[in-house]
Image (tube, rainbow, N blue to C red):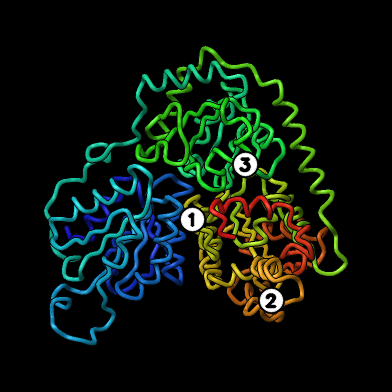
Amino acid sequence: MKVYERIIQLFEAEGVNTLFGIPDPNFVHLFVEAEKRGWQVIAPHHELSVGFMAEAYWRMTGKPALCIATLGPGIANAAGAMMCAKVENSPVIFLGGQRARVTEQRVRRGRIQFVKQMPLFENAVKYSASIEYADQTDEIIRNALRVAQSGTPGPVYIEYPAHVIQQDLNLPAPLPPQAYRLVEPGADAAMVAKAVQLIKAAAHPILLVGHAVHCTRAGEKVRKLAELMACPVIQTSGGTSFIKGLEDRTFPYGFSQAAIEAVVKSDLCVAIGTELGEPVHYGKWRHWAANEANRKWVYIELDPTAIGVNRPVDVPLVGDLRTVVPQLTEALKDSPRKPSADLQGWIESDKKRLAQLAESAPNLSGRMHTARWAVEATKAFPKDGIMVRDGGATVIFQWTYNQAKPHDVIWNQNFGHLGTGLPYAIGASVADGKKRPVLFLTSDSAFLFHVGELETAARLNLPLVTVVGVDNQWGLEVGVYKRTFGHGKTSEPGVHWSKAVRFDKIAEGFGCKGMYVEKGEDLAPAINEAFASGKPTVIHVPIDPVANHGGIENKDMPSYDEFRTWYAEGTQ
């Protein structure tokens, strides 16, 4: 076999059968071979999109994702996605081409499409290596897969010089994953027993559920534990995918009064799949501070070096949450807790919160208020759908006004990279097999980053509806200028742009369906019509620019002050 055939076999052994990349000459043989073997080969228009699509694939499957970029400018384009994957803890394997090593060793200038790539990327990935000899293929690919999925997950970079990819190998079938790496390790039994003692003794336990629960597809396992604990489930801002069966008792940290009350009153927190970072105030200040002295912590974490870094922990359970959560469930199955006396009250108060927000979202006579945009769009969210978010100010409005409780939500929470949304939506739909409807909520500035990928959505005929809130400005940045310098006291250089842009017309040019909606009451019917059409659709919604950046005194964006507390060191 050739080296490129062996690379494909090694990924197949891990259950990977999808690759994202632009079919450049460096990789033509690999692409053709993958397609012959029944792989999905997804070719978008920009390598940065390639990386984001691969990351969404991981989030929807729990499997490492493969993306490919050619040498020089191709892999340079993908570098931003490497950084996102590192901060978002996504095990994306970036496979990059390179010119033959004889080119690198020659004492010459002016070499085309050449730069030493590995030193540029080594700090943006967990592991970086080059396949210098054909017989290194197995060990390097396996080590990349091992490192990407061990400890805190993250991206890796592998390159091969052009003279290696078509060399011959004579090897047996690839090893299964469990033969060369630790697969889903469990926690120490004695520590599990200590955790169970704390759970049984607690009067007011909570589960703090983070991003990794969604990405590892562990929702059902966490549901069983939550039912035995009969307690509230507090979502981190990164873990916004609701677990089926727990929708009513799940409250978003910081944005729900029920969540705040449950946190303040808790005497035990079982934290699952979260770094306990800035968005949850490290688990020790703001909402946590009042009852800190009386609260115990059980922390399920794959990376032992993360234990105790952001806050002290009473019982660390080191292992893969897909294994550790069932260990806890098994130990608790004969002694389920009775529901907290406050739980039903919190459920009712959170229902009232959502209803009141839907009722109170302003209706403007001109352009739509962003709060109304978020309410009407999320009211129309398909029950079995996938939700994707992107943008700045529009996302903050969604935190507050979202009326849906989707089981899959994808957005770039940790790194805050604008423009990820459309590639994420495409990658998620590909990973899902194009079965479930995808609702993508974004703003104009973010959408323009990768608007060319509408052609990819149209070519793949994805069940994707995009709702674009259009204020013709970088809305969050306008608000920062005004809060910094005072309203009307300074210009906002570079944050406004042409009102002539019509995203519905752009969509039609790419082969998608385009719609234009001005009134709040028309938005949900438009979304329903778009999904019924069977075509990828873009709905252009003009939103009020003043309301979108928070209004004159920032009263239109009720979650902004909470958002600012995330910057724990006072960077704002």
Q: Sequence order check: which comes first, mark 2 or mark 3?
A: 3
Horizontal and vertical percent position of residue 25: 29, 74
Front position among marks 3 and 1:
3
- Where is residue 456 drawn, in percent x and y? 51, 67
Q: Residue at image x 71%, y 20%?
A: 341
- Give the left or right position of residue 420, taking residue 42 as reference: right
Kindly report which numbered mark, 2 or 3, lies closer to the viewer in this rendering. Answer: 3
In the image, is 35 to the left or to the right of 198? left
Q: Image check: 174 left or right of 206?
A: left
Helix, strand or loop at mark 2 = loop
Mark 1 residue crowding within 10 angstroms, few (<14) / some (14–19) / many (20+): many
**Residue 511 falls in which quadrant of the image?**
bottom right
Give amino acid for label 3.
Arg
Q: Secondary structure at mark 3?
A: helix
Assign the C terminus to one quadrant of the image: bottom right
Q: On screen, 65 above or below 228?
A: below
What is the quadrant of the N terminus in the image?
bottom left
Under mark 2, the amino acid is Arg
Residue 65: horizontal and vertical position, in percent?
38, 53
- Three-letter amino acid code at the position of disc 1: Val
The nearer-to-camera label among 2 and 1 is 2
Q: Which residue is mark 2?
A: 502
Q: Where residue 286 is drawn, which disc sits there?
A: 3
Q: Which label belongs to residue 430?
A: 1
Asked if 369 appears above or below 387 in the picture, the reply is below
